[in-house]
Amino acid sequence: MTASDAAQNIVLTGFMGTGKTTTGKRIAKMLGRPFVDTDKVIAAEHGPIPEIFATQGEAAFRALERQVAQELSQQSGLVISTGGGLLVDPVNAEVLGATGRIFCLTASAAAIISRVTGPRRAKRPLLDVEDPEAKVTELLAERSEAYEAFEQVNTDYRSTHHVALDIISRL
């Protein structure tokens, strides 16, 4: 990795449950870089994401994502984990892509469902519906074109360590 590569941000995107945060933390630790989770930034500044969705709506949340993407694009040397819909917005993709290398973590619908549903899992506003499995399939289909624009890294049946090494080897 050259000095200019070290200044470039590493941006992880993909659907919920594909391992963006866990993998991002691992990469940051392995490379000695700061880690930023866009959802955590939004929650710290504006309150819990489920509450933002419930009280202000998805459009307000997406506007906050745009603001965070713009702020992070002004920094360098970060490992950034985005919310699952952040880089579906072409403006965010352009802004973060200008200062970083974007990797899209992927997983099968079955793997995603097993990772994000169940009583001990974090509440996911977009899956707060009668049939979460159908919603996952629907959202994956809606976002597939946007996700395919980025370098793909499959996380099915792979440890976080191996996914992180895969991404680092591509830098």
Image (cartoon, rainbow, N blue to C red):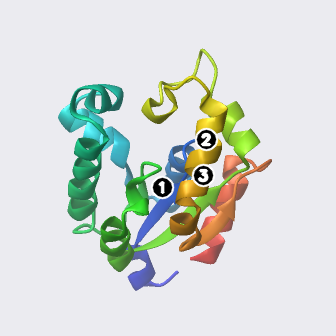
Q: Secondary structure at mark 2?
A: helix
**Which one is in front, 119 or 77?**
119
Which percent across, then down, holds residue 19? 59, 46
Q: Residues within 10 Å of mark 3 (few under 14, many from 20)?
A: some
Label of residue 140 in the image? 3
Q: Is residue 121 above or below residue 138?
A: above
Label of residue 136 in the image? 2
157 on left or right of 46: right
Closer to the camera: disc 3 or disc 1? 3
Q: Is residue 38 above or below residue 165?
A: above
Q: Residues within 10 Å of mark 1 (few under 14, many from 20)?
A: some
Q: Amino acid at mark 3?
A: Leu
**Residues marked 2 and 3 touching at CB (< 8 Å):** yes
Q: Amino acid at mark 1?
A: Ala
Residue for point 52% across, 31% down: 127
Q: CA distance from mark 2 to mark 1?
A: 28 Å
Q: Secondary structure at mark 1?
A: helix
Q: Earlier in the sequence, mark 2 or mark 1?
A: 1
Label of residue 28 in the image? 1
Q: CA distance from mark 3 to mark 1?
A: 27 Å
54 on left or right of 19: left
Q: CA distance from mark 2 to mark 3?
A: 6 Å
Which percent across, then down, holds residue 142? 54, 56
Q: Earlier in the sequence, mark 3 or mark 1?
A: 1
Residue for point 21% across, 60% down: 71
